[in-house]
Amino acid sequence: MRQNCFYPRNNLGGVCMKPWLCAAGVQLRDQIDTWYPDRRTTSDGWLGDARHSTTKSDHNPDADGCVRAIDIDSRLDTSEGISIYLADQIRKCAKTDKRISYVIHNGMIASKILNYKWRKYRGFNKHIKHMHVSFTKLGDKDSKPFDIPLLGGKI
């Protein structure tokens, strides 16, 4: 008998997998929390809501329950300006760290399509109040720290 599941795509044989955030997502969020302990978290999130569940989104759990996306509120300190620099450093990190799939912030997206160069994002949500980071399957179990200068990495 099929059970009702908030995420029907994950309803395999009547079993609903409990959603879990990929290890890379946990690591990046923890690094941001460490370096910006007083940041605003209002727009933070990782698990998609009902609206997300009807679309293709990395915020939706896969068949194993893994979620491969985080949203980070853009207000890291007293202003929202520093998030632009952090998003850009995450973009640069993605060129060599294959755990990162793409970054969206302030109406721009960077992905492997153009070797992580910023381009206009044409999606519904321009990600002004938060940045979105999606991860690849390589990040499911890999929790090594990200080498990002604003998060304690090399300059």
Image: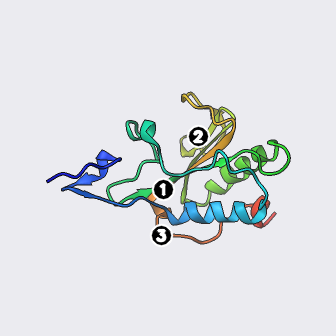
Residue 53 image point, x, y percent:
39, 41
Is residue 147 at all visible to an observer of this figure?
A: no
Circle 2 packing at 10 Å, graded few (<14), some (14-19), many (20+), is: few
Residue 85 image point, x, y percent:
78, 47
Q: Which residue, as the protein is rendered here, is positioned at the far bottom?
A: 144
Q: Secondary structure at mark 1?
A: loop
Residue 114 image point, x, y percent:
58, 40
Residue on which the image places disc 1? 136
Residue 154 image point, x, y percent:
78, 67
Q: Which mark is residue 114?
A: 2
Q: Give, as a three-letter code, the residue at label 2.
A: Leu
Is residue 16 left or right of 82 when viewed as pictured?
A: left
Q: Secondary structure at mark 3?
A: loop
Circle 1 packing at 10 Å, graded few (<14), some (14-19), many (20+), is: some
Q: 41 or 63: nearer the eye?
A: 41
Q: Which residue, as the protein is rendered here, is positioned at the far left?
A: 1
Could you tell me how many numbered marks the image carries? 3
Q: Give, as a three-letter code, the residue at label 1.
A: Thr
Disc 3 versus disc 2: nearer the observer: 3
The C terminus - image quarter: bottom right
Q: Secondary structure at mark 2?
A: helix
Q: CA distance from mark 1 to mark 2?
A: 17 Å
Q: 80 or 99: nearer the eye?
A: 80
The N terminus - image quarter: bottom left
Q: Which mark is residue 141?
A: 3
Q: Give, as a three-letter code, the residue at label 3.
A: Lys
Q: Residue at x 77, y 63 (%)?
A: 35
Q: Earlier in the sequence, mark 3 or mark 1?
A: 1
Task: Indicate the quadrant where residue 31 lies.
Answer: bottom right
Q: CA distance from mark 3 to mark 1?
A: 11 Å
Is residue 85 at all visible to an observer of this figure?
A: yes
